[in-house]
Amino acid sequence: EVQLLDSGGGLVQPGGSLRLSCAASGFRFNTHAMMWVRQAPGKGLEWVSSITGRGDDTFYAKSVKGRFSVSRDNSKDTLYLQMDSLRVDDTAIYYCTRGRSEGAVDWFDPWGQGTLVTVSS
Amino acid sequence: QSALTQPASVSESPGQSITISCTGSSSDVGGYELVSWYQQYSGKAPKLMIYDVNKRPSGVSTRFSGSKSGNTASLTISGLQAEDEGDYYCCSYAGGSTWVFGGGTKVSVL
């Protein structure tokens, strides 16, 4: 069974940093692009970042570019999201999710259970 | 990148059909055959229901179907059931390896 387990969320002050992790199992991790999608409390979904299966290409939403960094360790089947210079409006549940193939996103399936990031003083 | 436009809510009686629209532009919905739809129950992670505009993943009920015309994609749920209540989101490729979601539609079964 394909599973994604998100972790690393918590409470952080504005301007602070946090690193999220997503442990994958049940599929060949390095053959799929991986993504982060977030959902602010009571709001809709927002694509945050994508990374190819080999980790050689990364993409970001304008709202997080220059502050967030996505990476992966294919030897550990784990996806990461390093979040720096956090702002109050980064408060959200962060989900990791899997794409169609090594170099293509195309869809988001399945999704992790999500990890809550709260940015507040 | 602005969110795709969806109706905030749709309500219908059991057994009836509903259609949720998802309107974008020629830079996203209208420009690519990469529209997908997600179902989300309260407090749960989203679930893929439709991909590539009109394809259903294995295990998704045939009551769910997708289509696209111009810059507007649609999700139709036929034979509405109580278990279909939840939030539905569309998503489209927006060029430059970026993705955009709709604002979400709350489906209520009366």
Image: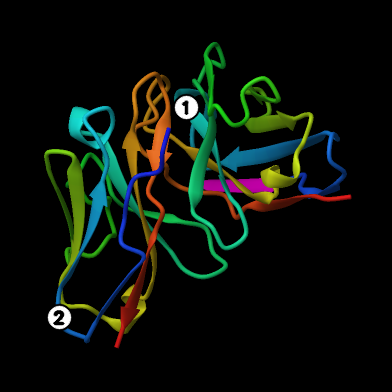
Q: Position of residue A23 (x, y in %)?
A: 65, 40
Instruction: Give the image quarter of residue B83.
Output: bottom left
Which chain does the numbered disc 1 sit on? A
Scheme of colours in the image: rainbow
Q: Secondary structure at mark 2?
A: loop
Amino acid bearing label 1? Ala
Q: Is residue B38 left or right of residue A72?
A: left
Q: Position of residue B62 (x, y in %)?
A: 17, 63
Tag nearer the camera, 2 or 1? 2
Chain part drawn in magenta: A1-6
Q: Which residue is mark 2?
A: B16
Choose between B67 and B28: the one closer to the eye.
B28
Choose between B106 and A110: the one closer to the eye.
B106
Q: Which mark is residue A18?
A: none
- Can you see residue B109? yes
Point out the residue furthest to the top here: A56
Choose between A44 and A30: the one closer to the eye.
A44
